[in-house]
Image (spheres, helix red, strand yellow):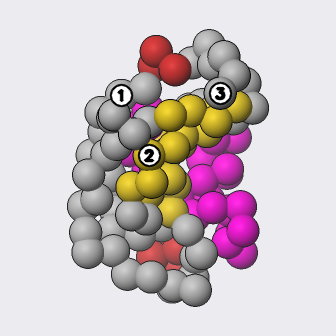
Amino acid sequence: MSYCSHEGGVRDVKPSAKGCEECLKLGEVWLHLRLCRTCGHVGCCDDSPNQHATKHFHATRHPIIEGYDPPEGWGWCFIDDVMLDLSDNMTPQDGPIPRYY
């Protein structure tokens, strides 16, 4: 793992939805979920058609997401472009979460 200057800003958050927040509103599908560790926004991954997690980063500049379906123990910092080990600080799934792929 490389250095992340934002890792100290990782917060315990409450997930905003039981699936990609925007896809649920639009009736769209997703592949994997990502959880913003600044505010709890749940968005879909970049392999999903709408890429809502990355769009959330661009709109808010919240730097760190967590793999969230189920919690996978890793994080990603968009700004520093590095993986993070979140295995000791995973967000519990607010499930069950439907799968759409």
Residue beneath label 3, please? 1
Which residue type carries mark 3?
Met
Q: Residues within 10 Å of mark 2 (few under 14, many from 20)?
A: some
Secondary structure at numbered mark 2 = strand
- Measured Cα–Cα span from mark 1 to mark 3: 20 Å
Q: Marks 2 and 1: which is nearer the front?
A: 2
Q: Marks 1 and 3: which is nearer the front?
A: 3
Q: Position of residue 67 (x, y in %)?
A: 50, 53
Residue 73 tag number: 2
Secondary structure at numbered mark 1 = loop
**Is 74 displayed left or right of 3 in the figure?**
left
Q: Position of residue 87 (x, y in %)?
A: 40, 39
Q: Which residues are magenta?
A: 37-59
Q: Position of residue 66 (x, y in %)?
A: 49, 45
Residues at circles 1 and 3 in contact by the CB criterion of under 8 Å: no
Residue beneath label 1, please? 11
Which image quadrant for residue 24? bottom left
- Measured Cα–Cα span from mark 3 to mark 2: 13 Å
Q: Nearer the viewer, residue 19 or 101?
A: 101
Residue drawn at point x = 26 percent, y = 52 percent:
92
Residue drawn at point x = 63 percent, y = 61 percent:
45
Q: Is residue 83 above or below residue 53?
A: above
Residue 50 is a magenta residue: yes
Residue 45 is a magenta residue: yes
